[in-house]
Amino acid sequence: MFNGKTKSNDFTIGGDAPASASASLIGAGTTMKGDITSNGDLRIDGTLVGNIHCSAKVVIGANGVVQGDINGQQADIMGKVTGTIKVKDLLQLKGGSQVNGNIQAIKLQIEPTANFNGECHMTPAAAATAPSGNGKPADIKKEVKNAEFAAG
């Protein structure tokens, strides 16, 4: 511990991954206020009151609570989110999750026991980079209000 050798404080996935692939965790029982910006994966198992800006994957655990907006490459939601979720790839609303707010994603997967209240905007991958005739990306709008998906 005090032998003069330096140790890395990087938390990496797989042990041999470079620092850019590091992951961050807000553990259960932790409450944090403020915005988070991360270049690596981020997992929230506690409570965050603030916004998330992540260039990788965001995971909200089953006991995780976020009161704020989420922006990321991908997201898996198992807990509770109150705010806007914008992802550039796949958004998964897992069973038991509760989302109150608008979502925007290229791909969306909602499990039967997820609860989602808000508007959903899906932009196909090709339209996200190529403008349509009016100069705006083609936008497919799907609106779901007060919808509860129950296992049947």
Image: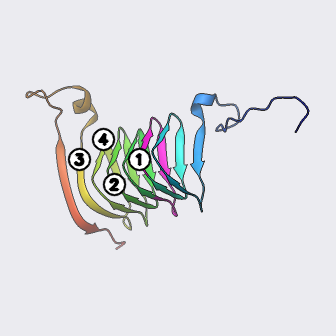
Real-space Cα distance between discs 2 and 3? Answer: 14 Å
Q: Residue 68 location, x and y as percent?
A: 38, 52
Q: Along the polypeptide, which appears first: circle 3 or circle 1?
A: 1
Question: In this rendering, which labeled residue sits more in front, label 4 or label 1?
Answer: 1
Q: Residue 53 location, x and y as percent?
A: 42, 40
Q: Is 46 positioned to the left or the right of 80 in the image?
A: right
Q: Are marks 4 and 2 in contact (CB under 8 Å)?
A: no
Write the start and end of the magenta stretch as one range: 50-65
Q: Along the polypeptide, which appears first: circle 4 or circle 1?
A: 1
Q: Which residue is mark 1?
A: 51
Q: Which residue is mark 4?
A: 106
Comparing 138 with 22, the one in front is 22
Q: Which residue is mark 3?
A: 121
Q: Which mark is residue 83?
A: 2
Check residue 55 for magenta coloring: yes
Q: Secondary structure at mark 1?
A: loop
Q: Residue at x 21, y 60 (%)?
A: 144
